Amino acid sequence: MRHNSRPIVCTNPAGDAPVSNPLIDGRQFTKDTATAAATVGTLSLAKSAHAAASDKLKLGVVGFGDRGSSAAVQALNADPGTELYAIADVFSDRMEHRYAMLQQGRANGITIDNPQDIIQRTELPRERRYVGFDAYQQVIDQVDVVILTSTPHFRPRHLAYAVDKGIHIFAEKPVAVDADGVRSCLESVRKAKQKNISLVSGLCWRYHHPRRATMKRIAEGDIGRPIAIETVYNAGGVWPPRRTRDQVNSEMEHQMRNWYYYTWLSGDGIVEQAVHALDTMAWVMGDQPPLKCWGSGGRQVRTAPQYGNIFDHFSIVYLYPNDVRGYHSSRHWSGSAQQISDYVLGSEGFCDVWKHSIRGQKNWNYSGPNNNMYQTEHDELFGAIRAGSPLNNGEYMCSSTLLAIMGRMAAYTGREITWTEALESEEGLGPSEYAWGDLPQPVVAMPGRNNS
């Protein structure tokens, strides 16, 4: 694995000038994006930036596993003029299994209301089902819209390629596993704005109508000034490890098959899953970055070698300007009490975000309609494409991902980590090349010893 081997700034695949660090100063970030928006009129529109209702949109999926196949159905539900045109995965068995389910009118974890329609719009020949580390290029080269649901480590390069090709994007969370990836994604976000490309993030709570209404109340001051935020993501175990080393042909295959358990692939649980909770914290704070964070974590339950090198619990404190503190805890302990909750204490009230209620000087309970936030993500993406009015979630997508990464950095090292330090970190996770062969087995971080 490479650590501290990448430069602080990054260049895009075309070799453009180094990327600045806009998230260090939110005011500069806003100024830069406003300038980019002002220049859009002088640039050519993205491919299919405005598609008439009668136009067929070709959909591609990169990472055609459980989430990718389900997202494909949601995209097709969102737009009747869209057809699945090409798919890709590094493992043919996983891709073909999920594709066969679609052709039977089934998908993982969601109900298909009109199976025959989905079957017809997902028919594609074997030659448009691609396999390999570079298969994403073959898909993106042929489509108008792409769903990026591969293992998180690869998201920055897939996103950069899709933006370079000028197609619209749904990018599942998290968008990166290290600061180098975040910086790459920031550059992709900047280019997407210039090209009028729609980019929707898989941070799905931003698309939940009750939570949107709740956050609007907080933003309008119904609980006064935020003083403290608590986010909890205490879940059970994740899926068990798949295929032992003696069941695969290489160490790369073993780690890829069991990607969740390796930090370089998943980012660890705080980045891959608990990023939803931290995105809520960021949302409450208007997406301004914290000053620094500190905390702890470790492996209490999942200690066997089969669980790779990730932790199974985290506890992080984020310090924001004006002494506002964000308290986050998350864990994966099977058989233990589970809790997923978000609370905000304000100077004039208290908000239970999950119950969509406020108590204090302005009592309030949400009474409007509920919605399927996963479907709404795609409804709004395709609505923006058809209207020719680009929707871009890239700024908070990158910021919330870095919020989770800096929490992991604090737990892994036992040090305080500033926002600037996290963004400028030279840590680059992953091998120097992607091929089916040998890989070192990553070590488990030891706070106080892993100080880089």
Image (cartoon, grey):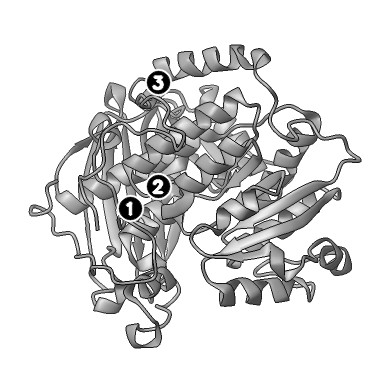
Would residue 179 be found to the left or right of residue 119 on screen? left
Extreme residue toward the bottom, this view: 246
What residue appears at the point 30 percent right and 34 percent down from the top-left corner?
Answer: 423
Say what secondary structure mark 2 lies in: strand
Quadrant position of the N terminus in the picture: bottom left
**Where residue 192 sits in the image (x, y, percent)?**
58, 30
Few, some or many residues within 10 Å of mark 3 (<14, 14–19, 20+): few
Residue labelled with disc 2? 231
Would residue 385 be found to the left or right of residue 303 on screen? right
User: Disc 3 and disc 2: Cα gap in Å?
Assistant: 23 Å
**Where residue 67 sits in the image (x, y, percent)?**
59, 62
Residue labelled with disc 3? 26
Q: Quadrant of residue 241?
A: bottom left
User: Disc 1 and disc 2: Cα gap in Å?
Assistant: 7 Å
Q: Amino acid at mark 3?
A: Gly
Q: In the rendered image, is residue 111 in sight?
A: yes
Mark 3 vs mark 2: which is more N-terminal? 3
Please state which of residues 242 and 311 is positioned toward the viewer in this rendering: 242
Q: Amino acid at mark 2?
A: Thr
Residue labelled with disc 1? 329
Question: In the figure, 30 relative to 80: above or below?
Answer: above
Which label number is shown at residue 175?
A: none
User: Disc 3 and disc 1: Cα gap in Å?
Assistant: 26 Å
Badges 1 and 2: C-beta atoms under 8 Å apart? yes
**Where residue 174 sits in the image (x, y, percent)?**
46, 49
Few, some or many residues within 10 Å of mark 2 (<14, 14–19, 20+): many
Extreme residue toward the right, this view: 54
Please state which of residues 375 and 63 is positioned toward the viewer in this rendering: 63
What residue appears at the point 56 percent right and 64 percent down from the top-left corner?
Answer: 89
